[in-house]
Structures are given as structure tokens and as C-alpha cells.
Image (tube, rainbow, N blue to C red):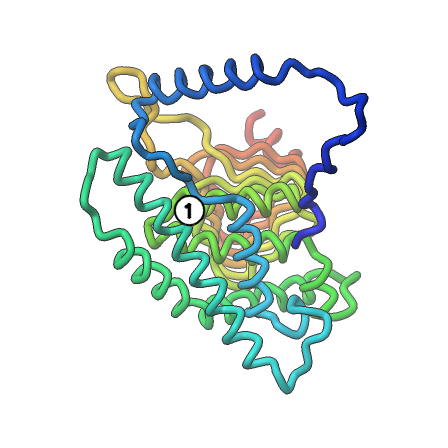
């Protein structure tokens, strides 16, 4: 179990237990839950867990990481002779657990949409089978990401150090798994996985973002990549870079329109230095370099070198 997970200490069994007036608090919390469910239109007859579990998904992702990189992210006593057995057994357990979480999301989505009688089990198995079949391809992408980090950081002494230590690699492993689930129609599970990585690394990548091979986030803290961002191959970002939206489209009744392209397109071989903020559906051309702390809301052509000074000259 992850060392962040802690259980509550046992209740004090001594005769001096404090009177917390729990009966009244429990009743009030029950009333608050019922009021919330009524305002949200939740049916009363569910009676069971309705949503995917963050704790279960953390365990599933940890297991999938071990299956992808068994001798480095797997158990400490693993030996190469039993590597394939470990991978097969770990995948069987993790994918069964993932199928249960997918069934929960499918049921939740069906209830939100007023649908009944859906064969969620068959659909969940098909989704997880599709994700499982994508794992060898994801391993290839992640190998390219690890290699890019090693080649891009003079402080890195080995690819193993990169995989074991770099928060950017942890974030991109989670992202590639989350993106596969997002594409398979599991946005809630994908978002939970993304937010687990966000909590652990300080790197916020929406699972909808499209990211090419050889992606490297150096240092990483404070990086934000929005849902509709498109990132090419061999792109490098430094800490506190934001690929965000400039404005949000609203409907006639003032509600936000979901899913519209609103984040940057970053082409191949781009480098974006620390603190840069790039907003809107603009394009950063291939091979461009964006300097530190630049605020950019317009497209730049391939090969550009954009700095604060160059932007000030343009505006002057």
C-alpha cells in the first residue's frame, strides 16, 4: 500500500472517553447527505457505492506501473527469472479491479443520463480489454519519454535514475494510462488517475491532452496542461509552464460550452522554459523556443525564439 495511506488509530477504550455528542452529529450529517441527494436528483434506491474509488485506482495504477516496468517499479524481491509470471499475475489482478471501477463509472453515467437496463459488464470488459491491448504501445511511448529525460538533463546519470526519481516521468506514466481510459470513454476514472499524479508530483495534466513521444518535463512543479492541448514529439517543458485557455465559450444562457478546442498546439521539438504562460488555441511552430516567464497569446512560426524582450519590442 502507498505510504501516503494511513488508517485511524483505534478508539480509546479507557473509561475516560470524551463525550463528543456523536448521535446528534451523525443525525445532522445524515440530513445533510439526504438534502444534497435530493437537490442533485439522486435516486434513493441505489444503496451501494456509486462512484469509482480513488484508493482502488491508486492501487491499480501502481500495479500497472509495476507490470510496465517490473524490475524497476515492481516488488523489491522480484527476480528476472519470474518477471513474466509476475507481469501476467499482476495484470490479471489489476485489470479485474479496473473492470470493477469501469462498471461503477458506466452505472453512474447511465443514471445521470436516465438510462436503464444497460449491459455494463459486457461494455466494461470490452473497455478494459482495449486498454490492456494498448499497454505494449504505451510502454514504447514511455521508453521514449524516459530516454528524452535522460538525454535532456545533464544531471541525469542513467535512465533508471530518471524512471525511479523524476516527477515528470511519474506524471507522464499516469497521463498515458489516464489518456487511454479517457479515449475509451471513462473521463471520471481518467481524471482521478490524473489527479493522483497531480497530488504526488505537482504536475497537472488533464487526461484529454494529446502528447507525442519523447515528452520531457524537467523539475515539473507547477506545470499545467489543459484538456484540449496538443503536444508533438520531443517537446520539453520546464517548471511552472502553463498551456491554458484564454477565454471560455458560453452558450446563450451563459453556461460554459464544454469540450471546445481552447488550449495551445505545440509542434515537434519545441522547448518552453520555466514560468512561461501560453494561452488560447494558438500554435507554437516546430523547433521554436519560448523563454522563461513569457506571456504568449498569439501563434509563433517554426524556429522562433520568443523572449520577454522580443515581445516588448513587438508591442512597442
* One can see residue 109 in this view: yes
Question: Residue at point 57% right, 55% down?
Answer: 59
Left or right of residue 149: residue 296: left
Q: Position of residue 209 (x, y in %)?
A: 45, 47
Give the vertical position of 177 relative to 280 (above or below). Answer: below
Q: Looking at the rendering, in which quadrant would you find the C terminus?
A: top right
In this view, the residue in front, 293 or 107, is 107
Question: Residue at point 54% right, 19% down?
Answer: 26
Q: Position of residue 187 (x, y in %)?
A: 39, 44
- Residue to which mark 1 is pinned: 208
* One can see residue 306 in this view: no
Q: Quadrant of residue 312?
A: top right
Q: How many marks?
A: 1
Q: Position of residue 44 (x, y in %)?
A: 31, 27
Residue extending furthest bottom? Answer: 81
Give the vertical position of 295 relative to 254 (above or below). Answer: below
Q: Residues within 10 Å of mark 1 (few under 14, many from 20)?
A: many
In this view, the residue in front, 6 or 268, is 6
Question: Residue at point 37% right, 61% down?
Answer: 128
Question: Residue at point 55% right, 42% down?
Answer: 195
Q: Looking at the rendering, in which quadrant would you find the N terminus?
A: bottom right
Left or right of residue 167: residue 27: left
Give the vertical position of 286 relative to 48 (above or below). Answer: below
Q: Quadrant of residue 65?
A: bottom right
In this view, the residue in front, 88 or 235, is 88
Residue extending furthest front? Answer: 15
Q: Secondary structure at mark 1?
A: loop
Q: Position of residue 85 (x, y in %)?
A: 55, 80
Left or right of residue 36: residue 153: right
Amino acid at each position: 500500500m502507498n505510504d501516503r495511506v494511513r488508517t485511524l488509530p483505534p478508539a480509546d477504550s479507557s473509561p475516560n472517553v470524551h463525550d463528543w455528542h456523536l448521535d446528534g452529529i451523525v443525525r445532522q450529517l445524515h440530513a445533510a447527505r439526504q438534502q444534497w441527494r435530493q437537490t442533485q436528483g439522486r435516486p434513493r434506491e441505489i444503496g451501494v457505492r456509486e462512484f469509482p474509488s480513488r484508493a482502488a485506482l491508486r492501487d491499480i495504477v501502481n500495479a500497472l506501473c509495476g507490470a510496465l516496468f517490473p524490475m524497476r517499479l515492481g516488488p523489491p524481491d522480484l527476480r528476472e527469472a519470474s518477471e513474466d509470471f509476475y507481469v501476467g499475475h499482476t495484470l490479471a489482478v489489476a485489470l479485474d479491479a479496473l473492470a470493477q471501477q469501469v462498471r461503477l463509472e458506466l452505472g453512474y453515467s447511465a443514471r445521470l443520463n436516465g438510462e436503464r437496463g444497460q449491459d455494463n459488464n459486457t461494455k466494461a470488459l470490452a473497455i478494459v480489454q482495449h486498454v490492456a491491448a494498448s499497454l505494449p504501445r504505451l510502454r514504447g511511448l514511455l521508453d521514449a519519454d524516459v530516454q528524452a529525460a535522460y538525454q535532456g538533463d545533464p544531471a541525469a546519470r542513467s535512465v533508471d535514475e530518471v524512471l525511479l526519481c523524476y516527477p515528470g516521468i511519474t506524471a507522464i506514466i499516469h497521463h498515458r494510462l489516464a489518456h487511454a481510459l479517457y479515449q475509451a470513454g471513462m473521463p471520471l476514472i481518467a481524471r482521478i488517475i490524473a489527479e493522483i499524479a497531480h497530488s504526488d508530483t505537482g504536475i497537472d495534466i488533464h487526461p484529454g491532452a494529446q502528447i507525442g513521444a519523447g515528452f520531457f518535463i524537467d523539475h515539473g512543479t507547477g506545470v499545467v496542461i489543459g484538456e484540449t492541448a496538443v503536444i508533438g514529439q520531443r517537446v520539453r517543458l520546464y517548471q511552472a509552464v502553463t498551456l491554458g485557455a484564454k477565454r471560455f465559450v458560453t452558450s446563450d444562457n451563459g453556461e460554459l460550452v464544454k469540450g471546445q478546442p481552447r488550449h495551445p498546439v505545440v509542434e515537434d521539438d519545441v522547448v518552453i522554459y520555466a514560468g512561461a504562460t501560453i494561452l488560447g488555441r494558438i500554435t507554437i511552430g516546430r523547433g521554436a523556443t519560448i523563454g522563461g516567464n513569457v506571456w504568449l497569446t498569439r501563434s509563433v512560426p517554426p524556429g522562433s525564439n520568443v523572449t520577454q524582450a522580443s515581445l516588448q519590442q513587438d508591442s512597442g
